[in-house]
Amino acid sequence: MAEVGGGMTPRMEGFLFLAGFGLCIPAANWLIGNAGTVCVPNGPCLVPVAPGVMAPSGVLMIGLALVLRDLVQRRLGLGWAFGAVIAGAALSALLAPPALVVASALAFLLSELADLAVYTPLQKRGLVLAVAASGAVGLVVDSAVFLWLAFGSLDFMAGQVLGKAWMVLAALPILHWLRGRDAARGIA
């Protein structure tokens, strides 16, 4: 596909989104074990996501990953998106701290598949709606599965959901702009 509007081709943008998606996984795993305003002994490093609400620090990267997976699908197609989810789960298992391998990989796999299942039928109705709805589903699935398997508790559920939701919400104006730019470039 040729360049559209003097910038990157949609396919090139897709590979850029794919690279960002892949980088979210090691970043989230590193953050949860190394960076936060508080690091709980034998537990996660935490960051504030609202007044009085803390969450494991990797939540911001996972929220971003949910958005980037949708953009991979938009630019490269369902096959690439599904492959990215499988590769991401494997990468998550390889890079997670030993105590978090199963929780990280399974939460990633299930949440991204849930995101994919919601995004796919909604994408024709609009990019912002599809990303917001699929992100909401994906972040709840990721939070519940990860917390339960990693820590045997849902104590940080509110913080997990809020932290990921902030990233999805922060992306919505950019997605609205992207949709408008795509329309101006003649991209469906």
Image: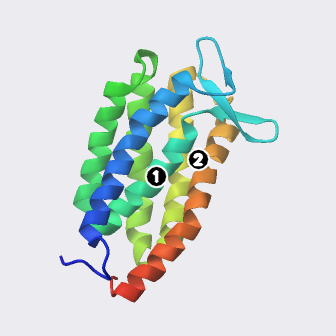
Q: Give, as a three-letter code, the residue at label 1.
A: Leu
- Residue at 41% in and 72% down: 123
Using the image as rendered, state which of residue 8 and residue 88 is in the foreground: 8
In which quadrant of the rendered image does the C terminus lie?
bottom left
- Residue at 58% in and 12% down: 42
**The quadrant where residue 107 appears:** top left
**The quadrant where residue 11 appears:** bottom left
Label annotation for residue 43: none
Question: Residue 180: percent from the left, percent from the top?
Answer: 47, 82
Q: Regarding mark 2 in the picture, which secondary structure is present there?
A: helix
Question: In the rendered image, which residue does mark 1 sit on?
Answer: 66
- Residue at 43% in and 80% down: 181
Q: CB atoms at circles 1 and 2 under 8 Å apart?
A: yes
95 up-or-down from 53: above or below: above
Q: CA distance from mark 1 to mark 2?
A: 9 Å
97 up-or-down from 26: above or below: above
Tell how many labels.
2
Using the image as rendered, state which of residue 17 and residue 139 is in the foreground: 17
- Residue at 44% in and 62% down: 118
Residue sitting farthest toward the right? 51
In which quadrant of the rendered image does the N terminus lie?
bottom left
Question: Residue 84: percent from the left, percent from the top?
Answer: 29, 49
Q: Give, as a three-letter code, the residue at label 2.
A: Lys
Question: In the rendered image, which residue does mark 2 sit on?
Answer: 164
Of labels 1 and 2, earlier in sequence is 1
Q: Horizontally, is 159 left or right of 122 in the view?
A: right
Question: Residue 69: percent from the left, percent from the top?
Answer: 38, 55
Report the coloring of the rendering.
Answer: rainbow
Question: Residue 12: percent from the left, percent from the top?
Answer: 26, 64
Q: Is residue 116 visible?
A: no
